[in-house]
Amino acid sequence: MKRVILVHGWDGAPEDGWFPWLKKELEGKGFEVVVPALPDSTSPKIENWVPSLASATGTADEETYFVGHSMGCQTIIRYLETLPEGVKVGGAIFVAGFLRALTGLETDEEEEIARNFIDAPLDLDSVRSHLNRSVAIFSDNDPWVPVTNAEDFKEKLGSEVVIQHEQSHFNEGAGFTELPIALEKLLGITQ
């Protein structure tokens, strides 16, 4: 059975935004869906989030897919980097993901949290070796994730890039309780 792991972002939770809708849609199509609550989401740390995702995922294989939002994308990427050589997952959908740049951070604490993810070493060749397919979805007016991140996903991870017009951060605060483009792209890579 194909499994999908939904990975929330910074200050997120499994029941936020479009995650409940996507979980229901996928389960209706026969997928097993796991939506872990990552620890201390208001202050995410690589050393806490990656092991938590690994534990929730269990054994990863080509029937395992990931959908991440924002910091959840970073967490998926860093988790993939930890997989043993030769292990591949089916793919990933990265929604408002980033590798090198965030904007709109308002406090020193926010800057520090972001810097810990952005500045930590990352072997993107290794990450790519574990991914069969990926799609990165961005908005051209995201207040935190500049669309310039799209090039990194395309060039370094081989992701298909989709840029949506005026969709903000694809979060509940911007009115998102459904995200059909994520469902469409996920179904496309699971075929």
Image (cartoon, rainbow, N blue to C red):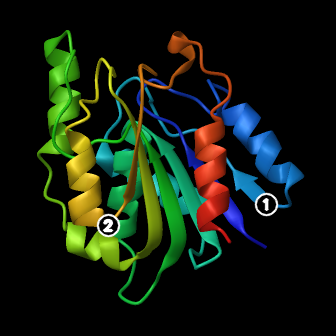
| Residue marked by disc 2 | 158
In the rendered structure, which amino acid carries the disc numbered 2? Gly
**Where residue 123 is drawn, which disc sits there?**
none
Q: Which residue is mark 1?
A: 31
Specify few, some or many for label 2: CA neighbours under 10 Å numbering under 14, 14-19, or 20 or more.
some
Residue at image coords 41%, 29%: 10
Amino acid at the residue labelled 1: Phe
Q: Is the N terminus in the top left, top right, bottom left or bottom right quadrant?
A: bottom right
Residue 157 position, x and y percent, is 29, 64
Using the image, determine if residue 69 lies above or below residue 185. above
Image: 143 above or below 27: above
Q: Nearer the viewer, residue 97 or 60?
A: 97
Q: Earlier in the sequence, mark 2 or mark 1?
A: 1
Q: Is residue 82 left or right of residue 3?
A: left
Location of residue 105 in the rendering, given as x and y in whole percent from the top left corner: 21, 16
Q: Is residue 54 left or right of residue 124?
A: right
- Count of numbered labels shown in the rendering: 2
* Left or right for 59, reference 29: left
Location of residue 48 in the rendering, given as x and y in whole percent from the top left corner? 38, 46
